[in-house]
């Protein structure tokens, strides 16, 4: 059975610097230099919702039928889904990925314009990151999502399936798409202009926390 590997580092917000991306995560803040990002994976989790509400409604109907003898129309619970957009960013020297979950990310930290559509916000975020990391590779699913090709954007039944696919994709870099091959047109909005220098005025290398220390691969994602 495929190993799930280490848990990803969950990104809550991000800010573009001159030569790095500053991400705020569940483990603190990190700087990801432009030349250290190596691979993007993308997937849509089809998450079932609404089951509990339907189950409670049917339960109330059955209770009324038992107590008052009223005939109730108990229906099968309809299945409803919401789409959760996930992206894993793999960085040189870090075993864990940096994960962006579209339902738990502050788009206003990095985009000039934030719309009502979560899919459009996520699409603009991905386009901005691909522009920013010129040496990175990404999956065909990511390309399909950005270019609105529904046949290529990959759906998963659960997060576990997405994580396994991401790990496999990272090990098969020869099958992935280099960023330079994707031509983003004007329909995709640009992110905020990067600032001239970062907070310290120094160039970042690799993944560092705000204390300037290299991230420890053995610590869990708390």
Image: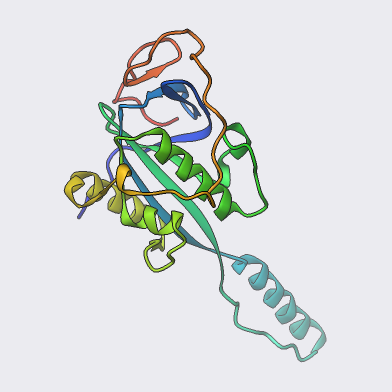
Q: Where is residue 95 in the image (x, y as percent from the top left)?
A: 27, 32
Q: Where is residue 143 in the image (x, y as percent from the top left)?
A: 37, 54
In the image: residue 169, left or right of residue 162: left
Q: Reply above or below: 164 against 134.
A: below
* Quarter that holds the C terminus: top left
State how the image is colored: rainbow
> Most extreme residue toward the front, as rendered?
186
Q: Please state which of residues 74 and 45 is positioned toward the viewer in this rendering.
A: 45
- Where is residue 59 shown, x and y percent of the image? 68, 75
Query: In the displayed structure, does residue 174 sit left or right of residue 106?
Result: left
Q: How many labels does the image show?
A: 0
Asked if residue 84 is positioned above or below residue 193 in the image, the reply reads below
Image coords of residue 213 (percent x, y): 36, 12
Q: Quadrant of the N terminus?
A: bottom left
Tell me what residue is drawn at x 46 percent, y 36 percent: 10
Residue drawn at x 62%, y 66% is 52
Is residue 87 placed above or below 76 in the rendered structure? above
* Residue located 65% across and 44% down the image: 114
Q: Is residue 193 left or right of residue 10?
A: right
Please name whichever residue, 191 or 170, is drawn nearer the observer in this view of the structure.
191
Q: Quadrant of residue 217?
A: top left
**Nearer the observer, 88 or 157:** 88
Q: Which of 47 and 206 is in front in this view?
A: 206
């Amino acid at each position: 059975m495929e190993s799930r590997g280490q848990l990803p580092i969950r990104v809550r917000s991000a800010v573009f610097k001159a030569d790095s991306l500053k991400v705020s995560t569940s483990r603190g803040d990190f700087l990801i230099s432009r030349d250290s990002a190596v691979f993007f994976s993308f997937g849509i989790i089809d998450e079932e919702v609404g089951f509990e509400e339907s189950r409670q409604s049917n339960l109330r109907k059955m209770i009324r039928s038992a107590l008052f003898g009223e005939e109730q129309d108990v229906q099968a619970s309809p299945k409803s889904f919401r789409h959760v957009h996930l992206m894993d960013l793999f960085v040189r020297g870090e075993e864990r990925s940096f994960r962006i979950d579209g339902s738990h990310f502050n788009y206003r930290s990095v985009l000039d314009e934030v719309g009502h559509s979560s899919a459009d916000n996520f699409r603009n975020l991905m386009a901005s990151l691909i522009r920013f990391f010129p040496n990175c590779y990404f999956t065909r699913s990511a390309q399909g999502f950005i270019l609105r090709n529904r046949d290529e954007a990959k759906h998963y039944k659960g997060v576990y399936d997405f994580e396994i696919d991401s790990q496999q994709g990272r090990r098969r870099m020869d099958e992935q798409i280099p960023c330079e091959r994707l031509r983003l047109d004007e329909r995709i909005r640009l992110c905020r202009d990067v600032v001239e220098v970062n907070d310290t005025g120094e160039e970042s290398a690799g993944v560092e926390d705000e204390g300037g220390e290299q991230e420890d691969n053995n610590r869990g994602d708390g």
